[in-house]
């Protein structure tokens, strides 16, 4: 099991980068990656265990978000869609943390609707020229490269863009509350020129690449967050035993004990869902439905448990040094990243044969 006792403290952008590097040095990025690709050669269940351990020890939702953006936004797209040359050139540095990356999908006027994306790529003899504006992109200020989705001849496609490429601007604004240690920002592409060998996957494969990346992210980003929820529960139980009310410990109050019981049920339910996604992946099965269900159930559970934790702690839960209130903000953000709760419901409805996305016959 990875030792996170020496994880660098939270702080500014440099601190976020140091914390991410520490996790890469511990081999956290190599789970569910084949040995021939410089991975551990284990499965998704091992990945879940490692991320649970991280969340329980660091309680840093931003770090978890940053790591998952790197893993599902860059490493796995390279594994799934990169050619042999691209894998050899990029994967060792991404897995070691020498390069920090992620993916850029969202734009100021386009979020969940990938058909509305306006960033463009034009092929020339000297390379691809990209123009566009991406927003709320995780890891942007600390990223060395990003997988950017743009339309080439009107077809959504993926391109590997380095921070040092001419015409590429990775900014640290706008800043958001919630998951504060996950650095975010805008990507501005102004006649950004990249080599022709930086296109990842076939022209028009961008939609499928985004779908696969988000399915994996939705399924496993909450492995680390469930670790945080386990820590929350332990803190609440300890507090309820120590705090006296009318001569009895706080947990003797049925209203409080019921909240704690519900927190336990949420943790166990979320863990069942994440482990089910791991089981499906390890047996080569699809996770489209399970990942949307996991994301919906876990994000709503994280928010409710965070609110309950603050309520149980009372006024002390509002103290700046108490992590519980900050986790409420993080939980609010978790309902939005990787697709909002409403988007997950749309996906679930479409996959079971109803809703706006269903295209079958009546």
Image: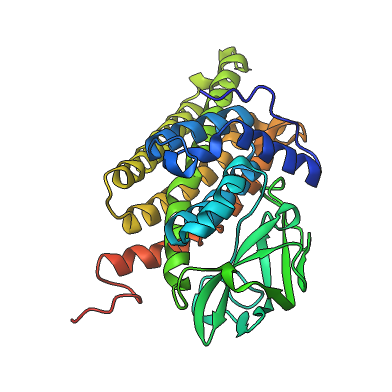
Q: Position of residue 196 (x, y in %)?
A: 59, 74
From the viewer's perspective, is 181 left or right of 47?
right
Q: Residue furthest top?
A: 247
- 184 in relation to 158, above or below: above
User: Where's residue 149, x and y in %?
Assistant: 57, 71
Identify the residue shown where x is 39% and y is 40%. Answer: 44
Q: Is residue 48 left or right of residue 318?
A: left
Residue at horizontal 78%, vertical 63%? 171
For residue 109, which quarter of the picture? bottom right
Position of residue 303 measured from the top left corner of the image (x, y, whole percent): 54, 46
In this view, the residue in front, 52 or 82, is 82
Left or right relative to 277: residue 125 = right
Q: Position of residue 143 (x, y in %)?
A: 70, 54
Q: Is residue 236 above or below residue 124?
A: above
Q: How is the image coloured?
A: rainbow
Whether residue 163 appears in this view of the structure is: yes
Q: Which image quarter is the C terminus in?
A: bottom left
Q: 58 and 189: which one is in front?
A: 189
- Residue 59's place in the image compared with 93, above or below, is above
| In the image, farthest residue toward the left | 362
> Which of these two is toward me, 90 or 101?
90
């Amino acid at each position: 099991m990875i030792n996170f006792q020496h994880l660098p403290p939270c702080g500014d952008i440099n601190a976020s980068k140091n914390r991410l590097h520490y996790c890469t040095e511990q081999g956290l990025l190599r789970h569910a990656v084949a040995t021939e690709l410089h991975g551990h050669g284990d499965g998704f269940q091992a990945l879940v265990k490692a991320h649970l351990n991280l969340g329980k020890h660091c309680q840093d939702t931003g770090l978890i978000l940053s790591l998952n953006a790197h893993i599902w936004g860059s490493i796995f797209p390279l594994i799934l869609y990169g050619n042999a040359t691209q894998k050899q050139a990029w994967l060792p540095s991404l897995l070691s943390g020498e390069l920090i990356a992620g993916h850029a999908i969202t734009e100021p006027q386009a979020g969940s609707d990938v058909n509305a994306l306006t960033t463009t790529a034009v092929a020339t003899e000297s390379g691809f020229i990209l123009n566009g504006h991406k927003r709320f992109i995780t890891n942007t200020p600390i990223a060395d490269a990003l997988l950017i989705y743009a339309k080439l001849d009107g077809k959504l496609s993926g391109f590997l863009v380095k921070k040092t490429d001419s015409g590429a601007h990775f900014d640290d604004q706008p800043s958001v509350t919630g998951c504060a240690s996950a650095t975010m920002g805008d990507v501005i592409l102004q006649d950004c020129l990249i080599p022709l060998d930086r296109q990842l996957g076939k022209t028009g494969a961008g939609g499928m690449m985004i779908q696969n990346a988000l399915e994996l992210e939705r399924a496993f980003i909450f492995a680390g967050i469930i670790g945080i929820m386990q820590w929350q529960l332990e803190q609440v139980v300890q507090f309820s035993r120590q705090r006296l009310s009318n001569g009895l410990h706080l947990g003797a109050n049925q209203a409080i004990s019921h909240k704690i019981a519900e927190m336990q049920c949420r943790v166990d339910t979320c863990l069942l869902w994440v482990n089910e996604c791991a089981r499906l992946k390890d047996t080569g099965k699809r996770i489209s439905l399970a990942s949307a269900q996991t994301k919906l159930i876990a994000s709503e559970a994280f928010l409710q448990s965070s609110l309950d934790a603050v309520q149980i702690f009372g006024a002390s839960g509002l103290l700046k040094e108490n992590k519980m209130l900050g986790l409420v903000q993080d939980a609010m953000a978790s309902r939005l990243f990787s697709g909002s709760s409403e988007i997950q419901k749309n996906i679930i409805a479409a996959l079971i044969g109803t809703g706006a996305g269903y295209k079958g016959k009546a």
